[in-house]
Amino acid sequence: MIAPPAPAVRPSAGLAHRLPTRLVWVLATVAVLLVVVVLSLSVGSRGIPPATVWEALFGRGTPADVTVVLQGRVPRTIAGLLVGAGIGVAGALIQAVTRNPLADPGILGVNFGAAFAIAIAVGVFGITAPLGYVWFGLGGALVTTVAVYLIGSAGRGSVNPLQITLAGVALGAVLSGIISAMLLANPQGFNAMIAWRAGSLQDRSWDAIAVAAPFVLLGVVLAVALGRALNAVALGDDLAGSLGANVTATRALSLLAITLLAGAATAVAGPIAFVGLMIPHLARWIVGPDQRWIIGYSLLLAPILLLVADIVGRVILWPGELQVGIVTAFLGAPVLIVLVRRQRVSGL
């Protein structure tokens, strides 16, 4: 007697089951982001009700409310969205490329490269306006990323993730030491960098936002396009190559995207820590190891975290402010300790 054939298993069944859940999470995340944006426009040393904010957005209401909303909080909130998106997606890319779950934009030296170039702009050339030094930040991030890439590929046919990580940490430490020496040698000349070095969204100009926005947008588009290839790279170089993925090209383009994203974000708001570390882990917990979804969720979740941290910084020392970079450090340090102490970190 011949046994009947086993029923065919549909490979897409699991994906079809998970897709509605992921879309529900997307809608929920977008809703939370909208609420946080409203809070960012309303909360501060001068509280403004949401209805008044809405009127002020169209130039109606008292001159004081219109000035606070349009000249202070709208550019600050947009800067938070832009910087958060850049840092979050850059963190997701770095963790995917290096296969290091504890990586963030600082581990490749991108933040320190941008900071070093901006220190040169401020201390040597006297450029203190964000519109002026944002270009130095982008250039410094690019040069640092290229240097790390070259060191990471020295003497090998392909780029080694561990070697990239070590090169980034070493170069970042050197640049950080040079920056500290420059600040100690001429503290008054670098006075304009004090708030920037701590990471701040305060007083961000429209000009600086307009300069950085195209770079972040290009980096996000490139990251989304690399999602499928990054899934293959996560399986290992040999298996990725057998699946038709160009591992070297994928890593090179990922480093370019990281430069655009983290470089532009750092140039606008300074080196903000831990956002690029925490958010990809949260996204991975929600959607699993698929890099395409991780990148998409990081694009939404990172601005939420950054704006919430900025709101907390505005009220915790009222009527003064605490820089957003300090708040994210307080939030991120416990998360890093938990990740390090876990026996098994989220799979990449």
Image (cartoon, rainbow, N blue to C red):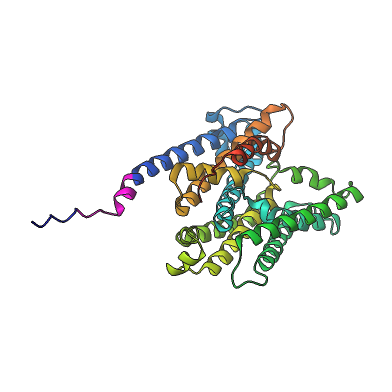
Residue 64 in the image, given as x and y percentages of width and height: 66, 32
Q: Quadrant of residue 156?
A: bottom right
Residue range in magenta is: 7-17
Q: Is residue 280 among the parts visible in the rendering?
A: yes
Is residue 127 shown above or below 26?
below
Q: Is residue 282 magenta?
A: no
Front one among 63 and 39: 39
Residues 56 and 329: in front is: 329
Vertical placement of residue 226 versus 76, above or below: below
- Residue 155 in the image: state x and y as whole percent: 67, 72
Q: Which residue is pictured at 72% across the width and 32% down the height?
A: 321
Residue 262 position by quadrant: bottom right
**Hey, which quadrant is residue 167 in on the image?**
bottom right
Disc count in the image? 0
Q: Residue furthest left?
A: 1
Residue at image point 84% right, 56% down: 126
Front residue of 245/84: it is 245
Q: Residue furthest right?
A: 185
Q: Position of residue 176 (x, y in %)?
A: 79, 52
